[in-house]
């Protein structure tokens, strides 16, 4: 994403704790493709959940990140 570096979380079954908390764990134990932008206070500022085969909307993610500045 244009040289942007950010932390990723892979959280699937049998653990899946974070996926369950965010409501994105599917029945077969895999997570939905989900992007959450969380500010420094821990507040969710952007949520995108979409089909695993789809590319995330980079422009909207970047817009959400720009708002954090």
Image (cartoon, helix red, strand yellow):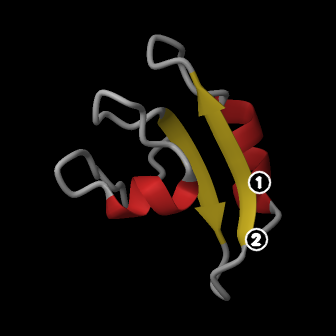
The quadrant the C terminus occupies is: bottom right
- Whether residue 63 sits left or right of residue 4 in the image: it is right
Q: Compared to 68, does 59 lie above or below? A: above
- Crowd tier of the residue under label 2, counting other residues whose Cα lies within 10 Å: few below 14, some 14–19, many 20 or above: few
Residue at x 40%, y 62% (from the top left corner): 18
Position of residue 27 in the picture relative to residue 15 (left or right): right
Image mark for residue 10: none
Label at residue 68: 2
Q: Position of residue 50 (x, y in %)?
A: 60, 25
Residue projecting furthest to the front: 27
- Name the one closer to the observer, 16 or 64: 16
Q: Is residue 5 visible?
A: no
Give SS at disc 1.
helix
Q: Are marks 1 and 2 in contact (CB under 8 Å)?
A: yes
Q: Residue 64 carries which label?
A: 1
Residue 13 shows in this picture:
yes
Q: Callout 1: 10 Å neighbours few (<14), some, many (20+)?
A: some
Query: Where in the figure is residue 65, as x and y percent of width and height?
Result: 70, 58
Residue 38 location, quadrant: bottom right
């Amino acid at each position: 994403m244009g040289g942007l570096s950010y932390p990723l979380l892979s959280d699937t079954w049998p653990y899946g704790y974070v996926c369950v908390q965010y409501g994105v764990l599917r029945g077969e134990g895999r997570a939905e493709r989900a992007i959450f932008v969380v500010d420094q206070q821990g507040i969710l500022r952007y949520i995108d959940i979409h089909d695993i085969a789809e590319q995330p909307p980079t422009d909207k993610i970047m817009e959400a990140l720009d708002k954090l500045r």
